[in-house]
Image: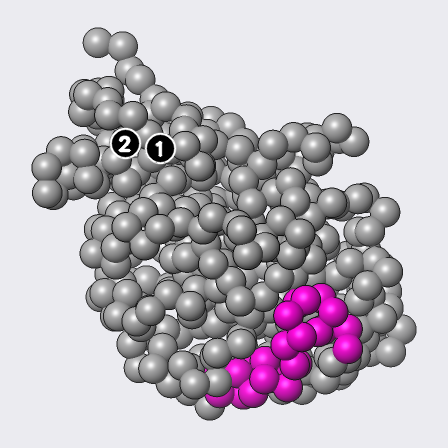
Amino acid sequence: MTSRVIPLIDSRVAMPPRAVHEYVETPAVGDLADKLGRPLRDLRISVTDRCNFRCTYCMPKEVFDSDYRFLRHSDLLTFEEIARLAAAFVRHGVEKIRLTGGEPLLRKDLHKLIAMLSPLRTQGGNELDIALTTNGSVLARKAQQLADAGLKRITVSLDGLDDATFRRMNDVDFPVRDVLAGIDAAAAAGMTPVKINMVVKRGVNEREIVAMARHFRGTGHIVRFIEYMDVGTSNGWRMDEVVPSREVLQRIAEEFPLEPLDARYSGEVAERWRYRDGQGEIGVISSVSQAFCRDCTRARLSTEGKLYLCLFAHQGHDLRALLRGNGAQGLTEKKIEEAIGRIWSARADRYSELRTEATPAMPKVEMSYIGG
């Protein structure tokens, strides 16, 4: 029988019913490698497509306005469905799971999902690395609850310390002090070191680079400076608005001398640098100027159960159909594992390595739908 790959489904189009055998013809379990030899090690799970910020580089107001149709609650994967899929991915070698959004802390009772994921163990028997990325807006009141549920690591998005700049970038007039309070609460709850992600956009917040480095230097927290990316199709991305990582490093090193650090593991996206005086480290993520596709080990699960193999993908593979398409329990665990294995084995994505002047205009799923 000829093997078939799960069909690509547009992220906003309902999937028509299909015969179960179309998804499960070729078994594939255990560790995986795609067509470029990349293993599956990281799974990013978006738990909501909603966000209370309207950051201009991610969910600009002119697109995500009051008329924008977000997913219905019934379209979202339940916590039980997410946990079931997560277990299947772990059996394929996933060692890290990151919960994202939208803004994941807008999903009601998210700590319950974390408690469901915490018992999972990697194939080697180690504790699963569970992390979360948040804009920090409600983190101050939820940090302890998340830590008690088993969350060990957290990343907070913060694009500047200047209040006027930050309010302008989040475009909902949210104050920077409340995000800083969330970072303090996460640290107090034991989720250290806190990572702070800053997207740098020329003409908007590049003057905040050194200020961010100075503020968090010596705190034990790690600031990561991210090149502004051509994710999705709504942010009007232009190459001349990208501040290359080498410029970021130069600005910081002029005030605080730096030296490189080795990567902690294969496939780490952030290039690590430490302050020569021992006051901590920073990272730069250079997906535009220095593409790292060849080491990418990440898959992304959307809020409604579509599996995306690249941050810049246009279409996803519908795993929710496998969970719900064959009675109350969907397909067996083995069949779901087979489907995941076959999808990853056929992967050959490397958008950033192939980026040209034309590719930013290509249709791509919005980052708020699949997380960063």
Q: Quadrant of residue 118?
A: bottom left
- Please name the residue shown 32% across and 62% down the image: 128
Q: Quadrant of residue 351?
A: top right
Identity, as a three-letter code, of the amino acid under mark 2: Ala
- Observer-nearest of 33 and 12: 12
Per the image, the residue denoted by label 1 is 14
Q: Is residue 316 magenta?
A: no
Q: Is residue 283 left or right of residue 48?
A: right
Specify the segment rendered in magenta: 164-187
- Please name the residue shown 26% across and 35% down the image: 321
The answer for how far apart the CA atoms under marks 2 and 1 are is: 19 Å
Q: Are marks 2 and 1 in contact (CB under 8 Å)?
A: no
Crowdedness near tag 2: few (<14), some (14–19) or many (≥20) residues, C-alpha within 10 Å: many
Percent of width and height locating residue 168: 74, 69
Percent of width and height locating residue 119: 22, 66
- Please name the residue shown 70% across and 32% down the image: 361
